[in-house]
Amino acid sequence: KNQVEQSPQSLIILEGKNCTLQCNYTVSPFSNLRWYKQDTGRGPVSLTIMTFSENTKSNGRYTATLDADTKQSSLHITASQLSDSASYICVVSPLSGGYNKLIFGAGTRLAVHP
Amino acid sequence: DAGVIQSPRHEVTEMGQEVTLRCKPISGHDYLFWYRQTMMRGLELLIYFNNNVPIDDSGMPEDRFSAKMPNASFSTLKIQPSEPRDSAVYFCASSAGVGDTQYFGPGTRLTVL
């Protein structure tokens, strides 16, 4: 079964610190992998998108990496801010079943404390 | 653009009642998606449309759920009759083309008592 697993489930860091969130997937083949940020009470918002041939993609303080050989992706947040407190969801779009049928991870809940 | 618009934002109803959730996608987007999010199961795709036509409804949990898209700017998700286990946040999303980024609405928090 195609799966996307994220770790840790939750994370607490101090403002200004860096952190890395992990995503392991078994979806294969896939067309792209995305990271979404979901603030409490809001819908998910796309942060980065990488095709299977890309290794890294940045969006400001957010940098996503992808290792297609080990089927792992990570999201690195630099110099965290209080506004980074949210859930971060790894999403894989498989080639089979249609590009639009996204497979979502359970998310990592990040809390940034002052 | 105002983004994806959903209404109502919150809905509380009693078991057995009919519930209708509404969505207005981003203008010009050809794809519309309905998702359900719960703590236990995370985000699940229920159904999606392309140019107002339902393409895949395999995620719709039961016959009690139905979705329509009468035109390019409006879609509904109906639950009849509703049950307590339908309590969740329902998101509508839209995208411009196949595989493009999906833009999510703010969601409707449904509570069935």
Image (cartoon, coloured by chain):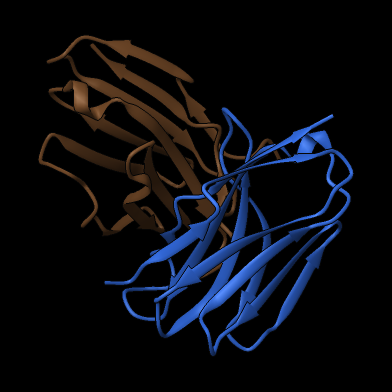
Q: Quadrant of the C terminus of chain A?
A: top right
Based on the displayed image, in which of its 4 quarters is residue A100 positioned? bottom left
User: Residue at (36%, 27%) from the top-left corner?
Assistant: B21
On screen, A10 above or below B55? above
User: Residue at (17%, 22%) from the top-left corner?
Assistant: B82
On screen, A84 above or below A60? above
Based on the displayed image, in which of its 4 quarters is residue A75 positioned? bottom right
Question: At which x and y percent is residue B37?
Answer: 39, 39
Based on the displayed image, in which of its 4 quarters is residue B65 positioned? top left
Question: Residue B31 or A80: which is nearer the viewer?
Answer: A80
Q: Is residue B83 left or right of residue B20?
A: left
Q: Is residue A103 left or right of residue A7?
A: left
User: Residue at (33%, 11%) from the top-left corner?
Assistant: B12
Question: At which x and y percent is residue B97?
Answer: 53, 66
Q: Is residue B65 visible?
A: yes
Q: Quadrant of the N terminus of chain A?
A: bottom left
Colour of the chain lettered B: brown
> Which chain is the one coloured blue?
A
User: Residue at (45%, 50%) from the top-left corner?
Assistant: A106
On screen, A29 above or below B27? below
Question: At which x and y percent is residue A28?
Answer: 40, 83
Question: At which x and y percent is residue A13?
Answer: 75, 41
Question: Residue B6 or B109: which is nearer the viewer?
Answer: B109
Q: Is residue B97 visible?
A: no
